[in-house]
Image (cartoon, rainbow, N blue to C red):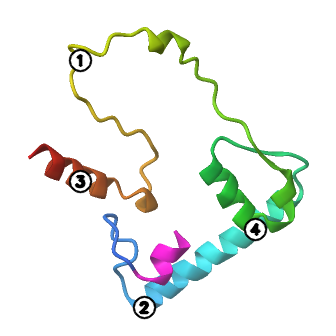
Amino acid sequence: MLALVWERRPTDDGGTRGSRLHACLKLVYYLLFALLYGRAGDAADVVLANSTWTADHIRSLWRSARGRVRILYPPCDTAALESAPLAGRENVVLSIGQFRPEKDHALQLRAFARCSS
């Protein structure tokens, strides 16, 4: 998110399209929040993340906790799925995630529209 604000890249929520002053104030807000967030991480004995991306993100913000970040993947039993038939299935694209500007869901929709046309 810091990169989006710093580069004043447009997002669908209009968050970085404002004036330079607005972008600078937003950047200061995010930097202060990241600093406080990092300080909170200093107090953690163990840090668990559910993916390599999240672990790397936490390591970038919580520099002193880098060695304490561990990945705990969500449990998912795929053995039952191995016997599921693939024939006769409908082609579906499913995207699950938070609606946040950096996830750029609009880009996913545009890409899907191009692929399906």
- Mark in front: 1 vs 3: 1
Amino acid residing under circle 3: Ala
* Residue 87 position within the rendered picture, expressed as x and y whole percent measured from the top left: 24, 14
Question: What's the residue at 75%, 68% (across, down)?
Answer: 36
Task: Specify which label sits upstream in the sequence, 2 or 4.
Answer: 2
Q: Could you tell me if the residues under marks 3 and 4 are in contact, i.e. CB atoms within 8 Å?
A: no
Amino acid residing under circle 1: Arg
Q: Could you tell me if the residues under marks 1 and 2 are in contact, i.e. CB atoms within 8 Å?
A: no
Magenta: main secondary structure equals: helix
Q: Mark 3 points at which residue?
A: 111
Check disc 3 and report its element: helix, strand or loop: helix
Task: Specify which label sits upstream in the sequence, 2 or 3.
Answer: 2
Question: Which of the labelled discs sits on residue 36, or is there none?
Answer: 4
Q: How far apart are marks 2 and 3 (CA)?
A: 30 Å
Amino acid residing under circle 4: Leu
* Residue 98 position within the rendered picture, expressed as x and y whole percent measured from the top left: 46, 46
Residue in the foreground of this view, choosing between 7 and 72:
72
Question: What's the residue at 60%, 76% (across, down)?
Answer: 29
Determine if the magenta segment contains residue 94: no
* Residue 77 position within the rendered picture, expressed as x and y whole percent measured from the top left: 58, 17
| 11 over 21 or under it: above or below | above
Q: Name the residue under label 1.
A: 89
Q: Could you tell me if the residues under marks 2 and 3 are in contact, i.e. CB atoms within 8 Å?
A: no
Amino acid residing under circle 2: Arg
Magenta highlight range: 1-8
* Residue 72 position within the rendered picture, expressed as x and y whole percent measured from the top left: 72, 36
Q: Name the residue under label 2.
A: 20
Residue in the foreground of this view, choosing between 21 and 117:
117
